[in-house]
Amino acid sequence: MSRPKRHALAVELTSHCNQHCAYCYNDWRADNGKEIGALPSDELLGLLERAFSEVEFERVTLTGGEPFARADIFEVLELCRRHEVGVVLISNGGLITDELAARLAPYAPLTVQVTLNGPEAALHEEHVGGVHFEATLEGIRHLRRHGVHVSGCVVSTAKNAARTRETLELFSSLGVDLVALSRFSPAGYAANNVAELLPSRGDVVSALEQAEAWCVAHESQVQVTMPTPPCVIEHSDYPHVSFGGCPIGTEMQEFALGPKGELRQCTLHASEIGSAKEQSFAALVNAPAVTGYRDVTPEFCAPCPERATCIGGCGAAAVALGDTGGLDPLVAQHVIEGFADRLRRERGRPLNVV
């Protein structure tokens, strides 16, 4: 029997991270994953062996927590290479030494994505907690020195949207010309910080205008990786920026294998499709929760011609907050009065709405 083909599998190698980001979507972030921990090495490698044998994944994303906090990460990379699966790593860069970068280079990952949330230490560290800015820059430099492809990420929030161009220019100075503009979506732990970090439409417009100008000036690429509903943002206004929607239930879905061996719809969703310890990956990726995910959309979206493709934006954030009418909070803050009232109370000021 042929294996089902799926786009990607994100593997959360560990729940531990050396940072404490206010925007973290990991549901376990509050205690730094102490209760959840990580799968033992033999169990993790066994699950991945099964995953690649039972489903034909185009690529795997190694994430966490912080993936380089996992001592056996090179055993995982060796297994991926043996199965000829392309690898993307998502890291904060702070644990990447020159020695580690040199050891990583022969595995030729598709990219290592590293996040910067401001052009200087104060703004970046306000988002990630602790003193990490210089270590992140050094991590990028180590990777570049050894020929490892580095892509960037900016988590766009109410606090840093106005300085998007400056942050992108910093990436340029580091030799990075592909950046994900990952608009803040308050799923998981980040739901605790929605009032502080959720960008308004005006914030997102500002960030996109700056991203568009940077793309043109440097012939570089910005990809908006979080769903950005067209009822809020007219994508065609930014012709040099690429936009993605929620891929769950489509051929571009990236499933998430969590640190307990659970398979989830994506890294932002907390609910489980099922346990990969107990069920085959082939059965899980074809489960009704996956195939029927796009059948239900928020009531607000009913008249919209983009409903089938947009499905209300980020459903994981809508579930995490619970009072958005099933809508992505980026939309809900402008059209769901109860949710908007809550944000006003928590912020202590009117919303910055345009």
Image (cartoon, helix red, strand yellow):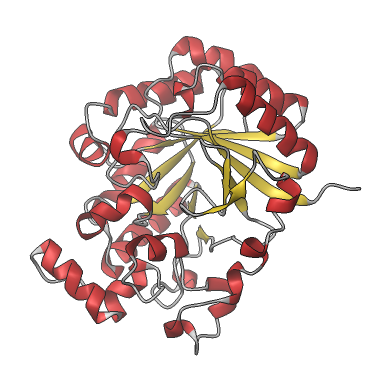
Q: Residue furthest top?
A: 99
Name the image quarter holding residue 257.
top right
Residue at point 34% right, 67% down? 322
Vertical arrangement, residue 334 with respect to residue 266, above or below:
below
Q: Quarter of the image holding residue 172? A: top left
User: Which residue is outermost to the bottom?
Assistant: 303
Horizontally, residue 190 falls left or right of residue 285, namely: left
Residue 24 or residue 292, whichever sits in front: 292
Residue drawn at point x = 29 percent, y = 40 percent? 30
Percent of width and height locating residue 167: 32, 42
Q: Which image quadrant: the C terminus?
A: bottom left
Instruction: Count every numbered label the image shows and give the total.
Output: 0
The image shows residue 71, relative to residue 2, as above or below, that is above
Percent position of residue 149, x then y:
56, 30
Taking the spot 47% from the left edge, 70% from the top edge, the residue there is 235
User: Quick check: 316 above or below 142?
Assistant: below
* Left or right position of 164 against 146: left
Residue furthest left as drawn: 348
Decide which of 103, 74 is in the foreground and name it. Answer: 74
- The vertical placement of 152 against 321, above or below, is above
> Which residue is farthest front?
278
Of 269 and 21, the residue lying toward us: 269
**Residue 211 appears in which quarter of the rendering?**
bottom left
**Can you see residue 169?**
yes
Residue at image location 29% in from the left, 79% down from the top: 336
Q: Is residue 249 visible?
A: no
Question: Residue 188: x percent and y percent?
Answer: 37, 51
